[in-house]
Image (cartoon, rainbow, N blue to C red):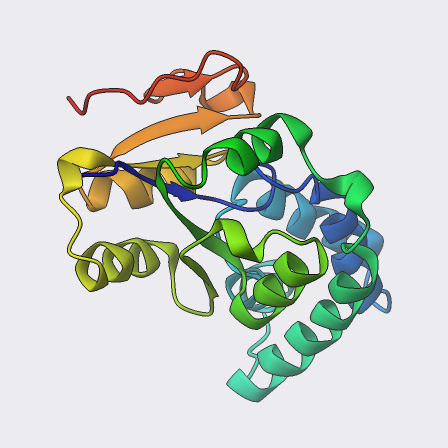
């Protein structure tokens, strides 16, 4: 039986944080920069959360104003247009992880579970020629906890042969609530959460505790 790896996308496969920072700055350019910075701090600390959650956070928590579902979708669409234009550059790929994926996609079951918008994610993977390495590519607005659960159930995976690789506390929480192993990557602030990958040159699939 093949072991299964669920991959986060941003910060693990694609170095996209600065571009996504810029995206939020652009869609909220008419607001106070000090308030936008509060959103960016939340965004950086919660990489695994979707833009839908972050847009709502900006309005309801930072601005203290209500926003309709339609309003969230409107800003999310503007954000996605920017991402589709700016994130298809292959120079943003994290070659350490991408090379591992290319060499091993026949050895493991690979899936993407990301806080990025699902349609945008599939577009980016196709543009970056990554799609063929993954059995499924899954994103928001479905929360990551549910994305992980859906993959485990749909493919009838044994949780003891599955793990999630991510770069945020949200990834760790999604793994733990679904009772699978977690390995952090590319973020030293989460080194102490569980296992951690410094690089993929000597990667060994860990036994679940």
At x 32%, y 21%, the residue is 194
Q: Residue 24 lies in what quarter of the image?
A: bottom right
Q: Report x, y in % for residue 89.
A: 82, 50
Closer-to-camera residue (94/114): 94
Residue 91 to residue 124: above or below:
above
Q: Is residue 22 left or right of residue 121?
A: right
Is residue 28 among what the camera can see? Answer: no
Closer-to-camera residue (9/205): 205
Q: Residue 184 lies in what quarter of the image?
A: top left
Residue 19 to residue 23: above or below:
above
Residue 87 to residue 76: above or below:
above
Task: Check the picture and name the quadrant holding the N terminus.
Answer: top left
At x 72%, y 52%, the residue is 20
Task: Check the picture and name the quadrant holding the C terminus.
Answer: top left
Q: Report x, y in % for residue 158.
A: 13, 44
Residue 74 to residue 37: above or below:
below
Q: Report x, y in % for residue 145.
A: 31, 54
């Amino acid at each position: 039986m093949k072991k299964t790896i669920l991959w986060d996308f941003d910060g693990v496969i694609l170095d996209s944080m600065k571009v996504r920072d810029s995206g939020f700055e652009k869609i909220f350019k008419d607001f106070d920069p000090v308030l936008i910075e509060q959103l960016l701090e939340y965004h950086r600390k919660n990489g695994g959360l979707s833009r839908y959650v972050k847009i709502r956070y900006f309005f309801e928590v930072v601005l203290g104003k209500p926003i309709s579902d339609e309003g969230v979708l409107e800003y999310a669409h503007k954000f996605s247009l920017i991402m589709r234009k700016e994130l298809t550059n292959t120079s943003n790929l994290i070659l350490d992880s991408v090379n591992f994926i290319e060499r091993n996609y026949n050895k493991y079951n690979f899936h993407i579970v990301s806080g990025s918008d699902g349609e945008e994610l599939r577009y980016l993977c196709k543009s970056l020629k990554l799609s063929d390495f993954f059995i499924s590519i899954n994103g928001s607005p479905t929360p990551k906890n549910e994305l992980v659960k859906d993959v485990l159930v749909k493919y009838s995976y044994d949780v003891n042969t599955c793990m999630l690789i991510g770069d945020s506390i949200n990834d760790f929480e999604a793994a733990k609530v679904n009772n699978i192993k977690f390995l952090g990557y590319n973020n030293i602030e989460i080194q102490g959460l569980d296992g951690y990958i410094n690089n993929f040159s000597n990667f060994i699939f860990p036994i679940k505790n």
